[in-house]
């Protein structure tokens, strides 16, 4: 069955949804995006996603294509038209279509595209087994805090992981783990402290990271926001990742070495439960 998508003011079946070959998202990866999860037909933590969208747009001097209320109304309309109960709403803003030039076009309206994807987010089998990851050199650019659509390096890293039978890649710079291909990364030390890379230009400020760290602090877990090395990760008692579409998922193996006892960890499990409870009863953030 064809989905209904949104392209610059029009709701269209996916076969009819088209953008210009001159769109700067296509030619220059000159665009930003957000992925908001949907549970029971409701957007999760969407206000925080829209706040990050504005930050990304501001960093690139790109105009917002619509107000937050308008964007939310379109997201909700797509959820309704596609009868989406569980999955994600993807939204992408690009600088629009203009004759190809490295300089930003003047007075070109930005472009807004949205679509839904159905996924079983809660009953993810990886919750039970945990993820196996490999480390791949982080080849991405210097402003990973801006959520741009230039995802080729991350895509290459993920494919490299799949090609060797792993689930995902952890990106490594020198001896430090920056983040995953599409998630933030965490280890738990022997004294129960969660360690995760601090915010800055090297990683994306994950919306799920923000929520999960708040929930962990409320649960009296000590958090250290600092770089951690691959060696530290291999010595950790557990490891996990967070993202909007996976919430919290345990990592049980890195480069073929078991983390802790090689089973999903207690803290990752607990944080996933707390996050999901709050998301489902509408009390997140
Ligand atoms: N880092 C990267 C590189 C990502 O692509 C993502 C997912 N978009 C995240 C972290 C997690 O961010 P969020 O929790 O907002 O999905």
Image (cartoon, rainbow, N blue to C red):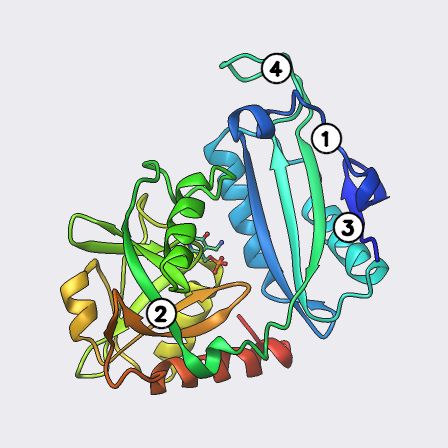
Q: Which residue is mark 1?
A: 19
Q: Residue at x 80, y 53 (%)?
A: 3
Q: What SS does tag 3 mark?
A: helix
Label 4 – label 1 distance at C-alpha:
19 Å
> Does label 3 or label 1 sit earlier along the sequence?
1
Q: Which residue is mark 4?
A: 106
The answer to whether residue 269 is above or below residue 137 is: below
**Ligand 1 within 8 angstroms of badge 1 C-beta:** no
Q: Are marks 4 and 1 in contact (CB under 8 Å)?
A: no
Q: Residue at x 32, y 36 (%)?
A: 142
Q: Residues within 10 Å of mark 4 (few under 14, many from 20)?
A: few
Q: Residue at x 37, y 49 (%)?
A: 157
Front residue (pair 105, 154): 154
> Does label 4 or label 3 sit earlier along the sequence?
3
Q: What SS does tag 2 mark?
A: strand
Q: Which residue is mark 2?
A: 132
Q: Quadrant of residue 100?
A: top right
The image position of residue 225, as x and y in percent, is: 26, 63
> Does label 4 or label 2 sit earlier along the sequence?
4
Q: Quadrant of residue 250?
A: bottom left
Q: Are marks 2 and 1 in contact (CB under 8 Å)?
A: no
Q: Residue furthest front?
A: 164
Q: Residues within 10 Å of mark 2 (few under 14, many from 20)?
A: many
Q: What SS does tag 4 mark?
A: loop
């Amino acid at each position: 069955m064809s989905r209904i998508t949104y392209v610059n003011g029009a709701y269209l079946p996916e076969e009819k949804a088209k953008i210009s070959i001159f769109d700067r998202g296509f030619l220059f990866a000159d665009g930003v995006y957000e992925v908001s999860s949907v549970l029971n037909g409701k957007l999760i933590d969407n206000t925080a996603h829209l706040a990050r969208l504005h930050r990304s747009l501001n960093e690139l001097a790109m105009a917002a294509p619509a107000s937050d209320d308008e964007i939310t109304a379109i997201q909700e309309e797509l959820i309704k038209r596609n009868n989406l109960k569980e999955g994600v709403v993807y939204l992408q803003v690009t600088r629009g279509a203009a004759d190809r030039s490295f300089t930003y076009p003047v007075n070109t309206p930005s472009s807004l595209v949205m679509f839904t994807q159905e996924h079983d987010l809660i009953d993810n089998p990886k919750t039970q087994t945990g993820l196996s990851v490999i480390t791949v050199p982080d080849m991405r650019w210097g402003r990973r805090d801006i959520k741009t659509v230039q995802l080729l390096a991350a895509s290459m890293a993920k494919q490299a992981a799949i090609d060797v039978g792993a689930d995902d890649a952890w990106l490594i710079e020198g001896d430090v783990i920056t983040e995953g291909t599409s998630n933030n990364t965490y280890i738990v030390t022997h004294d129960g402290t969660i360690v995760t890379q601090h915010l800055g230009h090297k990683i994306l400020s994950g919306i799920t990271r923000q929520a999960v760290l708040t929930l962990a602090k409320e649960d009296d877990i000590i958090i250290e926001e600092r770089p951690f090395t691959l060696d530290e990760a291999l010595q950790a008692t557990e490891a996990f990742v967070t993202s909007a579409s996976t919430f919290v998922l345990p990592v049980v193996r890195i480069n073929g070495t078991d983390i802790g006892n090689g089973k999903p960890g207690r803290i990752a499990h607990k944080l996933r439960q707390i996050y999901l409870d709050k998301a489902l009863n509408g009390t997140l953030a």
